Image: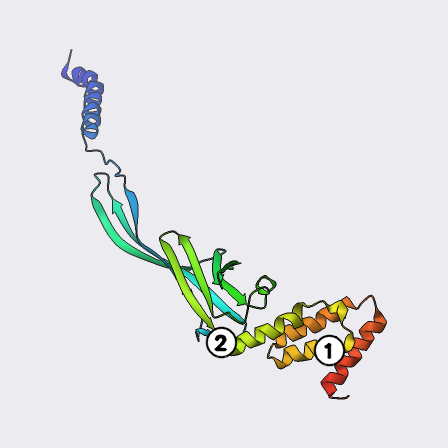
Amino acid sequence: MNTAGMQSSLAPWALWLCAGLLLGGCSTQPQTIPTSSRVETTLLSHTLSIDAGEPRVLSTPQRNIRVTEQKLQQITEYDAQDQPISSRDSYQALPWANQNLTLIVEGQQFTLQTDNEGAVRLNLLDEQFIELDFEQLRVVEVIARASPNVVAEQDLLVSRELRSVLQEAIPLIYDNLEEGDAQQWVERVRRLHALGLGEESAQLENMLILLTVGDPELQFEFIQALEREHSGSP
């Protein structure tokens, strides 16, 4: 066999050998193994705070109350060998939304619920409070409780003037309306306004107008009496 023939027959084998060496070389290259990690969160502190406004002494029956929840957490990231890669503190202050707020008033317990903003409106003229002895009322204790260990408390004092207003206003708002006539209704509306309870005065007036829809004559009499009261006519 001549030299040219041998070279021709060896060429394919040489190509296969080179290809095998290249593939073998590639297979020995180090592989990149993805590293896994985990994140661990540790609660460092959890508190609630109550903002009941100022002053702490109530001079009107209404008061807006807002509750905020604060959490301080430590966030630690670990690699596949459980070595910390990073660690940082995270602080959150969020509304204590849609939660029950407890009121302790003269030894009795009442419940209000916060809204989506963590706020609630206290109104001592609400129906749930009408059986209280307002003459003895001194303190409204506000309690927010997320757990046995996470509790916030705030006291609101009740002024002497407000106690007097509440004592007089409750019967004006809640006593049976059927026992009075149009002029007596007007007197109740007028007296609530004079006590500084304009909102309650307007609500009672509107309710009486609605209640007399089925008796146009009585409704007209009531409206006429209201107009005389507003104009100062006898």
> From the image, which quarter does the N terminus lie in?
top left
Q: Residue furthest bottom?
A: 233
Q: Residue at x 65, y 70 (%)?
A: 171
Q: Nearer the viewer, mark 1 or mark 2?
A: 2
Given residues 34 and 193, the one toward you in this image is: 193
Q: Where residue 154 sits in the image (x, y, percent)?
A: 41, 65
- Considering only vertical position in the picture, is 88 above or below 64? above
Is residue 173 toward the left or the right of residue 182 in the image?
left
Q: Residue at x 20, y 16 (%)?
A: 9
Q: Where residue 169 sits in the image (x, y, percent)?
A: 62, 73
Residue type pointed to by label 1? Val
Give the residue number, with chain letter if any, for mark 1: 186
Q: Residue furthest top?
A: 1
Q: Residue at x 26, y 48 (%)?
A: 76
**Element under label 2?**
loop
> From the image, which quarter does the C terminus lie in?
bottom right
**Element under label 1?**
helix
Is residue 91 toward the left or the right of residue 210 in the image?
left
Give the residue number, with chain letter if any, for mark 2: 159
Q: CA distance from mark 1 to mark 2?
A: 28 Å
Q: Residue furthest right?
A: 217
Residue type pointed to by label 2? Ser
Q: Residue at x 21, y 46 (%)?
A: 84
